[in-house]
Amino acid sequence: MLFYVELRLLLSFFPALIFAQTDEKYLAGAVPEENGKVVFSKDITAPSLSQSQLYDMLLLWANKRFDKDKNRVVYANKEKGDIAALGEDYLIFADNALSLDRSLMSYQMIIKCNGNICSLSIQNIRYEYNVSYKREPERYTAEEWISDKNALMKGKLARLNGKFRIATIDYAANLLNEAESLLAKSAMIQSVTPQQTEADVFSPASEHIISQSETSSPLQGYKQVSPDKIPGNIIKMVSEDWMLITVGDDSSFNMMTASWGGLGQLLGKPVAFCFINPARYTYQLMEKNDTFTLSFYTEAYRDALQYCGSVSGRDTDKVKGSGLTPVATPEGNRAFSEAWMIIECRKLIAQPLSTEAVNDEKIRGEWSGKQMHKMYIGEITHVWIK
């Protein structure tokens, strides 16, 4: 035990120990500073929205986003267009049967609306990290713990504070993108007028085009759009934001979180593809059914997606545990009303993957001796967007 304590103390005083992380988005310059303070910020322009509209939308979002535990809106001034909120959340580094490694992070979020420009910033970031041999948690500020000066050594991440830096960068990006996504969708709705029957309205922030010719939706709360009007960056939506694959009907259905997949064109049809490991419960349902849905969510539902990806539906009521609300499409497929987009698919091709088919030697070696996923390519039959 003495050796462990001494080793832990030694590590805490030597941030030069390198953390194996090569992703450039976490390296030099990834943690911005203003006057020596760590500040993550983003400016969003919404030409079709007034300052009053921007303020009202963001205040509504902030009141919902910061509404539990110690999260709350602490200042709101519509005349000035200013909103301030206090946030508190856990950064999860590892969560498994053997250990839970996490840190409590607190921060301030400042929102300033000026004309049709909204400036958001996340600042005054602090951490509380429990260490087994100490009665009180260790406390750090972002400036002393995740800045380039303190978290990088020879261009790479230091071992101890590297995980804090990665998790904070991801958390800040997701929070800012959540607000941007809200405004992008609101701007598109505001900009469509009855006189624009022939014109399409383009929103650069979401890369989405809405036409007045798009049909009204029989799925309550959603609008049906054609597959070529699917918004957003699908690579980011799948790899960073994640999605739920849901398969089944009234008698039995299940959902699982996925971060592999994409969209495209195949055999003259718009398609979506995803991958499921045969060990997953959802695999059994996918094999029995001809249709499935892919649904996408804002950062507010990150915990629900994490839950759906870590718990099996074989012996757990995942719907109850996730807190999500099931909804049936007109075709009878299952998804959840919290999703901002639902893509319905009919199976077109199902093909098991094999290590022999992997061209990358490193990846082939990593999967050697392991069971690989099965690829499902589905024809996109409907797309529903809130």
Image (tube, helix red, strand yellow):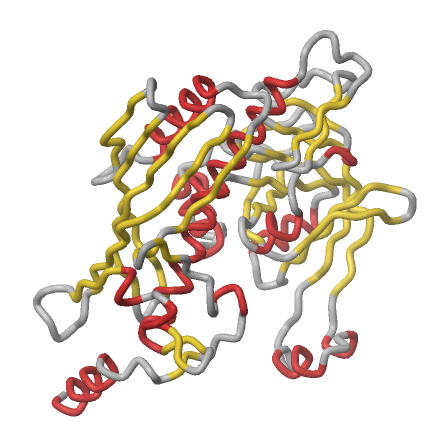
Q: Give the image location of residue 375, x and y in percent.
A: 73, 58
When asked about the image quadrant of residue 195, the answer is top right
Looking at the image, residue 358 lies above or below residue 114: below
Asked whether, in this view, residue 243 is left or right of residue 313, the answer is right
Q: Residue at x 54, y 69 (%)?
A: 24
Report the quarter where the N terminus lies.
bottom left
Query: Which x, y percent locates residue 18?
Result: 40, 82
Is residue 318 visible in this depiction of the protein?
A: no
What residue do we see at 74% from left, 68% from top? 353
Quadrant location, the C terminus: top right
Question: Between residues 100 and 71, which one lies in front from this camera angle?
Answer: 71
| Whether residue 385 can be seen here | yes
Outermost bottom residue: 3
In the rendering, at what x and y percent does residue 39 appear? Answer: 36, 51
Q: Nearer the viewer, residue 150 or 386?
A: 150
Q: In this image, 296 relative to 348: left or right?
A: left
Q: Residue furthest top?
A: 194
* Left or right: 324 in relation to 278: left
Q: Residue furthest left?
A: 135
Whether 341 is drawn above or below 360: the answer is: above
Residue drawn at point x = 63 percent, y = 37 percent: 206
- x and y, in percent, of residue 302 in the image: 44, 46
x 66%, y 70%: residue: 372
